[in-house]
Amino acid sequence: MRAATRHEPGCGTMKSFWRSERGQGLVEFALVLPIFLAIVFFIIDAGWVTSQKTAFDQGYMYSSWEISAGQIGDSDPLETSPSRAVYTGARVSDALMETMRGSNLWGVLPENVSISNAEAVFYNEEEVYKVPGRTAGDAVPALNRTRYMNLSADIRYDIYPLTVFGQFIFGNHITMEKKIINPWKWQDERSYVQAVEVNNNTGTLYCSGQAAISPNGVSSNDDMKSQLLQAISNLEEVITSAGYECEGIVRLNLYTTSMEELWPHFPVLQEWIAQHNIKSALTAMEVNGLFETLKVELEATVVK
């Protein structure tokens, strides 16, 4: 007696097809996974590096603003303090580091900061003026003494990528360097610094002079304030369109046909500078004329 064998058509073919599909899926997953992880790690490290660069920019500015004479050791009463005193080395760098540690708001890692060539120069300025005396019409001399501090230092910050992939792309670490160069203090009220040194930047943008010209290329006939606002807006658009940030401006030139007419509106420019935390060298010049009816023009150099 012969046994009957039942055969299911297509069953073996379906199992084979399923195994083939599963194997192909595993191969595709194995190929795509490294690319996916590389993108994820790049996003993580790029975000980390960017945030640390921003933190350092804010931290070093905070430390230069907030450091006090008492931290450096110049704490004698103004009446008895020497007319000029110079402090260098660890006394100044330690005070800067202490102030930077207090700027935890900015996310700076103090262990990655190194400070060199730190110097603080203190000096007195005296002004004699007249005040009313005890009798009518009488005036007696009075003395006003002000003590100033000029601070300079080279500050270095090392940024370490978080992942091995980040180290492969960015290197073992990225070094940022800032140099505080302010021989005087009066420029602080005018929203600029005397000099800016930039090291290890990844790009430089040289902007043509921007004035109050519409997108259609028509020069403005408006007053000085309106033209200044339009020039600022145009400059900002050029910078952002190029992938840069206004905070990266290191050189700003201003040309105007009338400094007398511009000066009452200078706070407009100062507010914009403060809004973007711009620390740039600035030159303002009065010229005989600009293109057509234009009254003010801004020219910038930007780094990132």
Image (tube, rainbow, N blue to C red):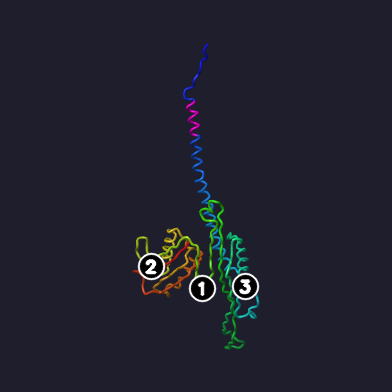
For the residue carrying disc 2, how many other residues have a C-alpha within 10 Å: few (<14), some (14-19), or many (20+)? some
Please tell me which residue lies in front, 86 or 81: 86
Q: Main secondary structure of the magenta part?
A: helix
Dot 2 falls on a residue whose secondary structure is: loop
Magenta span has 68?
no
Q: Amino acid at mark 3?
A: Ala
* Label 3 SS: helix
Q: Which mark is first along the chain, 3 or 1? A: 3
Q: Mark 2 highlights which residue?
A: 222
Q: Residues within 10 Å of mark 3 (few under 14, many from 20)?
A: some
Question: Which mark sits nearer the N-terminus, 1 or 2?
Answer: 1
In the rendered structure, the answer to whether residue 20 lies left or right of residue 123 reads: left
How far apart marks 2 and 3 lie (CA) works out to 48 Å
Q: Residues within 10 Å of mark 1 (few under 14, many from 20)?
A: few
Q: What stretch of residues is rendered in magenta?
A: 12-21
Which residue bears the numbered disc 1?
Answer: 187
Numbered badge on residue 69: 3
User: What amino acid is at disc 2?
Assistant: Asp
- Which picture quadrant has residue 231? bottom left
